[in-house]
Image (cartoon, coloured by chain):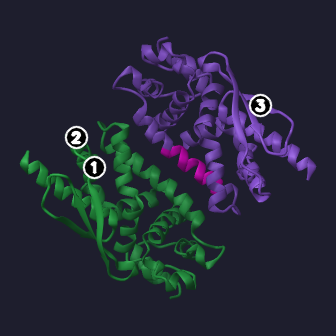
Chain colours: A purple, B green
């Protein structure tokens, strides 16, 4: 699909002075030299600053460790790829034929890079305040649901610490099945813990997520027995 | 040593509206709760943005990999600690008694954290433009000597690739001696390469630096024979 300035600007709800800059922001390196990697490098640093500044202001009592975890929660690859999906960016990406064929437009890393590149392009085209405002719009849901509890440890870590404290062996995660097409796979992961007889499974779009969900279920079972 | 606002402002050549903020920026966590870790978190992200922005502007032909290496070269812990030394910050740091005793005021990580915290404090006290201007002043020497060649691979990596390409075993680095007091140690490192009979030593303030220097010497010897 060829680049459509009007459609992309509608999706991201922003008007660019430089059409070339906006096109570059959605152009993957598989296309050639004039790709979005430089903009991504710039956008990544701008996003890091905007988020650090916001967390510092919003959580005056949070220490550095908590802020780092909140930041990692907000701007990791998966979270940025979801923003790309929310904005329906996949069909706006300019990819080389190989990436196009292999479903690259749905790949988390490619979507996440494009979102960072858009932030970089917005900064160059409109300045820091505009880039910041746009980041707050696209992160609105995640920012408004953010609490200090978000920074608490993830379920796998919690489960491991729970078991270690009780001298029980670490849990064993096994992929029970992978179904679906390349960019739409479902991972079914089993979590085995010594002393829990129930079979605990979770299904999610990534192995990691399914592991976390299984760990949360096991934790629930264990804690309901405490 | 107790905090001296006047002396510190003279050293960093900046006037702060908030004395408390400036004191916090030089206060290590060993002192207690009101330390510089939150400011360091903020300053680290601001510095990352300022440098990425500058590199993006100054090197329009550099790709993302080159810019990443230039950034790592400019803002790594050692480089920031050197800025702290250039500013003569050691005696302005507020440390707990334990850190004070063990020479913490000269430790690279503590100096580097304080420099980042100063950048964060400057941003909060005076805004982004002032923080950016200060960063350019303290990084002036390093920024002006920066070229795309700076981003080339370090001597150890170059040596390893040189040897691998010729099927020669990887070099062996050995610490021949460590001399000097805790915060002023000198590392003497020997580099052995199959086929080079000369004994090659370098002495530097860190093991890593001494290794790099030895690798550079060996490379010179090898390349002069090519």
The residue where tag 1 is placed is B170
Disc 2, SS = loop
Looking at this view, name the residue that lies furthest to the left. Answer: B225
Q: Are marks 1 and 3 in contact (CB under 8 Å)?
A: no
Asked if marks 2 and 3 touch (Cβ < 8 Å), the reply is: no
**B20 falls in the magenta region:** no
Q: Nearer the viewer, residue B43 or B219?
A: B219
The residue positioned 49% from the left and 40% from the top of the image is A43
In the figure, is residue B139 to the left or right of B225?
right
**Residues at marks 1 and 2, CA–CA distance in whole angstroms:** 9 Å
The residue closer to the viewer here, A39 or A191, is A191
Q: Residue furthest bottom?
A: B1
Rendering quarter of residue B18: bottom right
Q: Is A126 located above or below residue B223 in the figure? A: above
Residue A67 drawn at (x, y percent): 64, 55
Label 1 element class: loop
Q: Alpha-carbon distance for marks 2 and 3?
A: 49 Å
Chain letter for the residue marked with disc 1 in the picture:
B
Quadrant position of residue A65: bottom right
Determine the residue positioned at 58% across, 66% down: B37
Point out the stretch of residues depicted in magenta: A45-56
For label 2, the residue is B167
- Rendered-image quadrant of the C terminus of chain B: top left
Q: Please, which chain is the residue tagged with disc 3 on?
A: A
Image check: A164 left or right of A26? right
Camera-near label (1 vs 3) is 1
Residue A85 x/y as whole percent: 63, 25
Q: Residue at x 83, y 33 (%)?
A: A199
* Of residues B176 and B8, the one drawn nearer to the viewer in this rendering: B176
């Amino acid at each position: 699909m060829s680049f459509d300035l009007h459609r992309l600007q509608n999706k991201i709800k922003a008007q660019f002075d430089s059409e070339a800059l906006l096109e570059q922001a959605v152009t993957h390196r598989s296309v050639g030299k004039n790709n979005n990697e430089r903009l991504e490098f710039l956008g990544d640093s701008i996003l890091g600053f905007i988020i650090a500044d916001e967390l510092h202001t919003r959580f005056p009592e949070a220490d550095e460790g908590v802020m780092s975890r909140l930041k990692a929660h907000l701007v990791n690859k998966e979270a940025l790829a979801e923003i790309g999906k929310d904005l329906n960016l996949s069909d706006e990406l300019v990819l080389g034929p190989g990436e196009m064929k292999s479903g690259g437009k749905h790949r988390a890393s490619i979507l996440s890079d494009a979102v960072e590149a858009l932030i970089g392009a917005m900064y160059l085209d409109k300045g820091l305040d505009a880039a910041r405002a746009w980041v707050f719009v696209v992160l609105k849901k995640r920012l408004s649901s953010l609490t200090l509890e978000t920074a608490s440890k993830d379920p796998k870590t919690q489960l491991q610490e729970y078991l270690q404290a009780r001298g029980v062996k670490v849990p064993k995660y096994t992929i029970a099945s992978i179904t679906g097409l390349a960019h739409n796979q479902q991972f079914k992961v089993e979590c085995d813990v010594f002393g829990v007889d129930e079979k605990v499974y979770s299904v999610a779009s990534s192995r990691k997520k399914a592991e976390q969900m299984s760990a949360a279920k096991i934790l629930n079972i264990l804690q309901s027995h405490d």
